[in-house]
Amino acid sequence: MNSAISEGILVNVEVFYQPEYSNPMQNEFMFAYRITIENFNSFPVKLLRRNWYIFDSNGTYRQVEGEGVVGVQPTLQPGENYQYTSGCNLRTEMGKMKGTYQMENLDTRTLFSVIIPEFEMIVPAKEN
C-alpha cells in the first residue's frame, strides 16, 4: 500500500491485478486500485477534480483529467474518510500512476492540491 499526506489529507492506494479482464496475448493488462482519502483537517473538504499521469513500461504515458472520482465529488468532514475503487488498463505488464486531487476548503472556499502517491502496477508473474 502506498500512502501520502499533503494539505492535511491522507491518500492510501492499494493495487490489484485483474487477470479475468486482461488479455496478455493482445497486450491488454487490467489493474484495479482502491483509494482511501481521509481528512485530518479541522474543516470540511470537497474533492472537485482528479488529474492522473499513467506510465506504461514501453515509455508511453497518458494524462487523464476530470471532475470528481467515479462520478461523484465527495465531501469529507473532519476525521471522515472516503473510499472508492477504479481501474486502469496498460499495454505492458508493468506501469505506474501518480496524480493530484483538486479540493476545496468548504469553510474558506479556497482550492488546494492533494498528492496522490505514485504506485506501481505489476503483473504478479513479473514480480519475481
Image: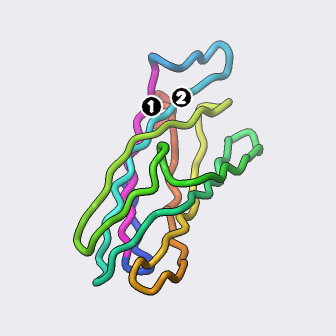
- Residue at 39% across / 83% down in the picture? 107
Judge whether 49 appears above or below 34 on screen: below
Q: Of 17 and 112, which appears nearest the observer?
A: 112
The disc placed on residue 17 is 1
Judge whether 41 appears above or below 102 on screen: below
Q: Of 114 and 94, which appears nearest the observer?
A: 114
Q: Secondary structure at mark 2?
A: strand
Judge whether 37 appears above or below 33 on screen: below
- Residue at 32% across / 66% down in the picture? 76
* Residue 64 place in picture, x, y as percent: 67, 49
Q: Residue flagged by tag 1: what amino acid is it? A: Tyr
Considering the image in quadrants, where does the C terminus appear?
top left
The residue beneath circle 2 is 30
Quadrant assignment, res 102: bottom right
- Which stretch is magenta? 9-19
Cα distance in 3D space between marks 2 and 1: 6 Å
Q: Secondary structure at mark 1?
A: strand
Q: Residue flagged by tag 2: what amino acid is it? A: Met
Of the two numbered discs 2 and 1 on the same chain, state the one appearing first in sequence.
Answer: 1
* Residue 123 place in picture, x, y as percent: 50, 31
Q: Residues within 10 Å of mark 2 (few under 14, many from 20)?
A: many
Looking at the image, residue 118 sits to the left or right of residue 62; the answer is: left
Quadrant assignment, res 6: bottom left
Q: Are marks 2 and 1 in contact (CB under 8 Å)?
A: yes
Q: Of 26 and 114, which appears nearest the observer?
A: 114
